[in-house]
Image: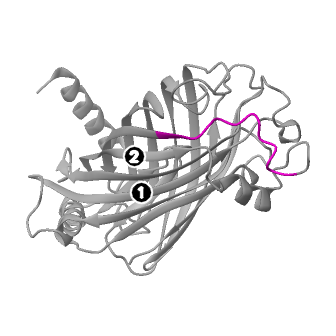
Amino acid sequence: MPVYHKRLRAALVAFAVAAPVHAHAGAFAGDMAAGWDWLAATDEIQTEGVFWDDFFGDGKDRWKTGGITQSYVFPEHIFSNGNWLKGRASALELNVRALVMTPDDTAFAGVNSDDRPFAQYAAIGLYLRSITRPEALTPVVAVQAEDRVGIEVGWQGDPLPLFDIQNSLHGMTGTNGDAGNLSNTIDGELLVNLEARRSWRFHIDGSGAGARRDLEFAPFVQTSLGMRENSLRAGGDFFVGSALEGRTWGSDLSTGAVMAGASMPRQGFNWTVFFGGDVGYIASDAFLDGGFAGGGPSVPRRDIVGRARAGLLLEYNNLGVGFSLNWLGQEFRGQSDGQVVGAIQLKYRL
């Protein structure tokens, strides 16, 4: 076993011993095994997604103004009887998303040539997702690895109707009082990207005589390679909730907002509080660099960016509703400060 694995295991053992958790090893093992067994055998289509907008955050027009992400996750047992990857529960994810990005002051759109450009984007992605069988590190601590790898194909710019939709909802007007005055807009182009993410989920069981409080820490690394963005991000999220075993989590590519994924059916009321963040190195960004070809309006991009988030998910039987605040650090030089966007989530089963 590598030295860092030994050190990590020792740290988790020490934490588990010191934490005021009253749990039973047998009950914990049964809960985790039942959760993973359900993921590995289910044929239920799962949904996850968020609607995000700066109106629900700091209320100001900023670079990333609004968007929507929706995923449909199809378990492997819809397509075959066996497991695709040994020791893993797998699924195919179909992801659709759209977003709008605006200058700092939309009242002078196209006049301030040094302001960030307008951008609109819509895409569809196909991903393979998988999660390993939980491995017990202590009587109350288990670890799983969760992976998401796939491709996204999107279109940036005209003739998408997103500016008109945003204007009708948000009042995004140019100097002539209409959303058509968009001379500072990146031209239309096709963007293809490969995406990969690996998360490690350290689950600490909190079952006992009283109300249940599970804890989960999920560090991750994420990379994006292609025409839309070349980047590498690393970070982590903490989850505290009443029932976290047998569950997967997603993440919005634009904002980093957490999205609740597949979960073992539970009756009654359940809750989850989460918070986290990440730091990224951005080698290229078509939305800030003037498009993939680089011939459109652009601004000097920052190479190192940070994000932070916190939110709450409430579930009753098969329905879940969540909200999170997502802080996005400065993404280009001359940007006065970061921004906060709110993300609303609806989770249900098909």
Give the structural element (helix, strand or loop) at label 1: strand
Question: In which quadrant of the rendered view does residue 116 lie?
Answer: top right
- Percent across and percent down for residue 69 are 52, 56
The residue labelled by disc 2 is 152
Give the structural element (helix, strand or loop) at label 2: strand
Q: Are marks 2 and 1 in contact (CB under 8 Å)?
A: yes
- Examine the rendered structure and indicate whether residue 332 appears above or below residue 157: above
The crowd level at tag 2 (other Cα within 10 Å; few <14, some 14-19, many 20+) is many
Q: Residue 95: which disc? A: 1
81 on left or right of 28 = left
- Percent across and percent down for residue 159 are 62, 51
147 on left or right of 186 = left
Amino acid type, residue under disc 2 in the picture: Glu
- Percent across and percent down for residue 118 are 70, 39
294 vs 337, nearest the viewer: 294
Write the residue at 24% across / 52% down: 130
- Percent across and percent down for residue 260 are 44, 60
Q: What's drawn in magenta, residue-wise? A: 178-190
